[in-house]
């Protein structure tokens, strides 16, 4: 675990859950595995606070626990997942994807489950129906059955899955404070046979509209009746969580489709989209290729609005196979030809394009030309780089040394004699794509950490103004709900002076820019992580 990853995880925990959870989580990351008493002692926090922090982390799937090194009789030990914490960067992207695929209902379902970590189906349906009803015109309401339908679709496409049941690891030491009996170890969700089975819930009715004056009382009533409601609905004990792996496969497929669209045309990308859609269920998550599909199957599965004749499809498939990017490969001639999408090769090409873009932005087009040349030719001497890149010797030397100092280019020595004498040694420049991708990934972690720190600083510096703005917005909403006159609303709006309003606009502009930058860097992080994982799996 690198320093930048630990720093980023700490900032994400602090932003989402507060300082106490951040302190507990960061210490667990650095220590690896600890029991409750050791964690409380080393962090110097109250035992009750540590317990609550661990509950939050476990609820959101960021912390696992089980029998420790002493076996089932010893205290339970806790382990944290950095990968799962970093997924919080993609929460807006998960929610937006659910909205684009399943509309507002799907968006709110995913948003609610992400906010709470895990929820029962009945409580999710009620909460989402209430929220949708609250935003509808007076007299309209959202039926529970519509939300149940959207929830079922998310489960059928594996975007939601049941939380895995916890299996008992044996009797625990009842005398120890930090060993809650029994010690349990969570299993993988995919190993559970009912992972994607939607239970029947006895839930009929429509969402309820909450009045602003009743919000506090409604929250208290909902908390008191949660257990009763679950028992009535028949899905008690069945909790659901977001399947991040499925979202990541969707992001990967979209990146490949967009790359094909940019490189060739929209029709080619639609053919690749059809191939990915047909094989998404049968292809394992870490496979280097999709399942082979015949040209006849692809032709029948193409959308009806794409009036592509069979000979035209064959030409497009040949074009995709012959393309240097190698997104599509041909594995046989039966059924009009058997074709696969080369997932690993596609990710490698996307990562390569990202590296080239970074070099061009940081060091200029000439340095990018040298970098691309080394990626293509693998090993070159300095004189060969100057000749092939058609760059003057002095400039080429400076650029190579700059790239070498940034670890984007490596220097390999090949001696003619065992004494490694410089006069009898070849010095070859090369680019190793995998280590370079790892290096850039660490730079991305650092950049996202800086963006989060800046946003937290901006918010803290303008805390008083933001609180005042929120209070005034709440007053305005309350007055509008009660049908106040326009003059009253104007008077309340004028409580914020012109300079304060200008400062607020500037702050919101900066925050939006930081959020946008964070999302863009996370796209690069996802691409590089996918390439590194794919490379490791293919070895």
Image: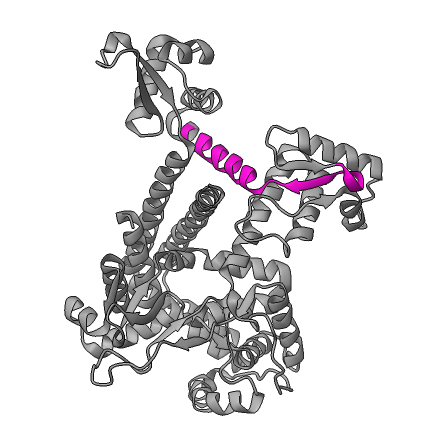
Residue toward you, 461 or 238: 238
Location of residue 387 (image quadrant): top left
Report the residue at 52% width, 87% height from top. 230
| Coordinates of residue 452 in the picture (x, y in percent) | 34, 53
> In this rendering, does residue 471 appear at all?
no
Q: Residue 151, image x and y in percent?
A: 61, 72
State whether residue 17 is above or below residue 168: above
Residue 136 falls in image quadrant:
bottom right
Q: In this view, does 182 lie to the left or right of 379?
A: left
Q: Is residue 361 left or right of residue 417?
A: right
Residue 358 on the magenta segment: yes
Q: Is residue 466 above or below residue 3?
A: below
Viewer-closest of 513 and 504: 513
Chain part drawn in magenta: 333-359
The image position of residue 302, as x and y in percent, is: 77, 48
- 236 part of magenta stretch: no
Can residue 528 be seen here?
A: yes
Viewer-proximal residue among 519 and 272: 272
Q: Where is residue 244 in the image (x, y as percent from the top left)?
A: 49, 60
Left or right, 84 with reference to 25: right
């Amino acid at each position: 675990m690198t320093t930048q990853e630990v720093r980023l995880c700490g900032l994400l925990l602090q932003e989402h859950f507060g300082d106490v959870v951040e302190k507990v989580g960061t210490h667990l990351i650095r220590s690896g595995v600890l029991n409750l008493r050791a964690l409380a002692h080393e962090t110097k926090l109250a035992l009750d606070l540590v317990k609550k922090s661990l509950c939050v982390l476990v609820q959101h799937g960021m912390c696992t626990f089980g029998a420790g090194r002493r076996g089932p009789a010893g205290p339970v030990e806790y382990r944290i997942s950095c990968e799962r914490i970093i997924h919080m960067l993609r929460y807006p992207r998960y929610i937006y994807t659910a909205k684009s695929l399943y509309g507002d209902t799907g968006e709110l379902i995913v948003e609610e489950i992400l906010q709470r970590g895990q929820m029962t189906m009945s409580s999710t349906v009620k909460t989402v129906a209430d929220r949708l009803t609250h935003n509808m015109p007076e007299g309209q309401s959202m039926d529970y059955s519509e939300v149940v339908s959207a929830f079922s679709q998310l489960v059928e496409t594996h975007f939601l899955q049941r939380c895995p049941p916890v299996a008992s690891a044996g009797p625990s030491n009842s005398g120890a404070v930090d060993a809650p009996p029994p010690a349990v170890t969570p299993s993988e969700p995919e190993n559970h046979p009912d992972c994607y089975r939607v239970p029947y819930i006895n839930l009929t009715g429509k969402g309820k509209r909450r009045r602003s004056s009743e919000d506090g009382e409604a929250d208290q009533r909902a908390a008191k009746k949660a257990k009763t409601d679950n028992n009535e609905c028949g899905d008690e004990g069945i909790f659901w969580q977001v399947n991040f792996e499925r979202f990541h496969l969707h992001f990967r497929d979209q990146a490949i489709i967009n790359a094909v669209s940019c490189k060739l045309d929209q029709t080619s990308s639609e053919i690749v989209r059809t191939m990915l859609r047909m094989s998404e269920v049968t292809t394992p998550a870490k496979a280097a290729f999709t399942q082979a599909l015949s040209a006849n199957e692809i032709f029948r599965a193409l959308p009806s609005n794409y009036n592509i004749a069979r000979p035209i499809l064959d030409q497009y498939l040949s074009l995709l196979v012959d393309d240097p990017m190698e997104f599509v490969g041909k594995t046989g001639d039966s059924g009009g030809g058997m074709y696969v999408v080369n997932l690993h090769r596609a990710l490698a090409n996307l990562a390569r394009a990202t590296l080239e873009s970074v070099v061009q932005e940081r060091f200029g087009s000439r340095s990018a030309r040298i970098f691309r040349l080394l990626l293509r030719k693998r090993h070159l001497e300095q004189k060969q780089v100057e000749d092939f890149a058609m760059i003057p010797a002095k400039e080429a030397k400076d650029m190579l040394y700059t790239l070498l100092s940034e670890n984007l280019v490596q220097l390999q020595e090949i001696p003619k004699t065992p004494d490694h004498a410089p006069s009898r040694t070849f010095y070859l420049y090369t680019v190793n794509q995998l280590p370079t991708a790892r290096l850039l990934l660490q730079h991305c972690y650092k950049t996202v950490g800086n963006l989060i720190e800046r946003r937290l600083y901006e918010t803290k510096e303008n805390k008083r103004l933001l609180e005042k703005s929120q209070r005034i917005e709440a007053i305005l909403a309350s007055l509008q709900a009660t049908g106040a006159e326009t003059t009253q609303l104007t008077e309340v709006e004028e409580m914020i002076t012109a300079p304060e309003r200008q400062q607020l606009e500037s702050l919101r502009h900066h925050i939006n820019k930081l959020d946008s930058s964070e999302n863009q860097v996370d796209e690069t992080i996802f691409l590089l992580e996918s390439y590194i994982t794919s490379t490791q799996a293919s070895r």
